Amino acid sequence: MTGDRTAVEAWFLAHGLPYFVAEERAAARAGLRPRRLVSLAVVVLVLAALAGLLAWASDAYAVGPALWLSITVLALIWYASTALRARPILAFALSRTLGSVRFLVPMASRALPLLLVFVTFLFVNAEAWQMTTNLPFGLLWFTVLLMFGLAVLFLLVRLPEEVDRVDDEVDDDFVVRACAGTPLEEASREVAADPGIDPRAHAQVSGFERWNLILVLLVIQTVQVLLLSVTVFVFFMLFGSLVMQVDTQLAWTGAKTVGEVPFLSSVSLSLVKVSLFLASFSGFYFTVSAVTDDTYRRDFFRVVESQLERAVGMRTVYLAARERR
């Protein structure tokens, strides 16, 4: 094998692929042992009980489910980043997304106009203001987390198709192109030139490595959706603070007061609630549209397409070169 194993594994770790390294994969597998998962469940249950007691003591019962769900999500992220060795996945995916904001501009310019036209009709609707204003903030936050969870679940169902599509395209030209500029560049040319090695025999990604690719895609696409949702939230906050006068809000909500956000006299709590709800709804709507509609699908996956091909190509050459050696 021409490429140095240490350099290749360091490349895998730097590019958010820890499960492509045998030692990291074994450590993650150990983190999924029943004994350790039971310990995690006990910690989550204790924190959930404390959250319930806090909600009960403050007479804000609606806060309980939202607080419990938030704690559970944070605990799972913490456990994944430590015991399951997923920290490189999170770090690379976040840096990749934030470093590729320029690719989000064409996607946003195509998706946002129609989305905003559609959601603005809900924004200038009295029923939407009544519903969100009457919701306790804890229950509203639970609804936001629920929509976010549905979007993540939808991505988990569809993203494996992208992995399957890429590893089905592997051939000699694919591995040479994918490994250009990597520690396996020379090895990829040797593998492609060897008639006794078929790269497709090592192309299928399964197990932990397949989930590694899916998680990288999931984090990157989730951050994209969050950025788009934040954009919608900021738009409605600015738009609402300009056109939605207090008298109009009181007439639509039927409340005696809409509440004022400290230090922002032009912004009401009702405006924050309806903007937050519509932003979360927009994120879910955009996720479904971007994955199912070919018009947005290409832009949505542009940020990760080359990285996915490179990861599959590197793994194929890594395994093929080991066999050749």
Image (spheres, grey):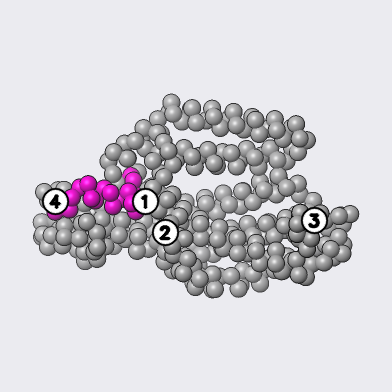
CA–CA distance between discs 3 and 4? 66 Å
> In this figure, which residue is indicated by the disc labeled 1?
16
Q: In the rendered structure, which segment of residues is drawn in magenta?
A: 1-19
Above or below, comparing residue 109 to residue 187 in the picture: below
Q: Amino acid at mark 3?
A: Glu
The answer to whether marks 2 and 1 mark residues whose Cβ atoms lie closer than 8 Å is yes
Q: Earlier in the sequence, mark 3 or mark 2?
A: 2
Dividing the picture into quarters, in which one does residue 243 lie?
A: bottom right
Q: Position of residue 128 (x, y in %)?
A: 76, 60
**Element under label 2?**
helix
Q: Position of residue 174 (x, y in %)?
A: 24, 64
Q: Nearer the viewer, residue 211 or 230?
A: 230
The answer to whether any part of residue 55 appears in the image is yes
Q: Is residue 163 magenta?
A: no
Q: Earlier in the sequence, mark 3 or mark 1?
A: 1
CA–CA distance between discs 4 and 2? 29 Å
CA–CA distance between discs 2 and 1? 10 Å
Q: How many marks on residues?
A: 4
> In this figure, which residue is indicated by the disc labeled 4?
1
Q: Is residue 17 magenta?
A: yes
The answer to whether marks 4 and 1 mark residues whose Cβ atoms lie closer than 8 Å is no
Q: Amino acid at mark 2?
A: Arg
Q: Earlier in the sequence, mark 3 or mark 4?
A: 4
Q: Amino acid at mark 4?
A: Met
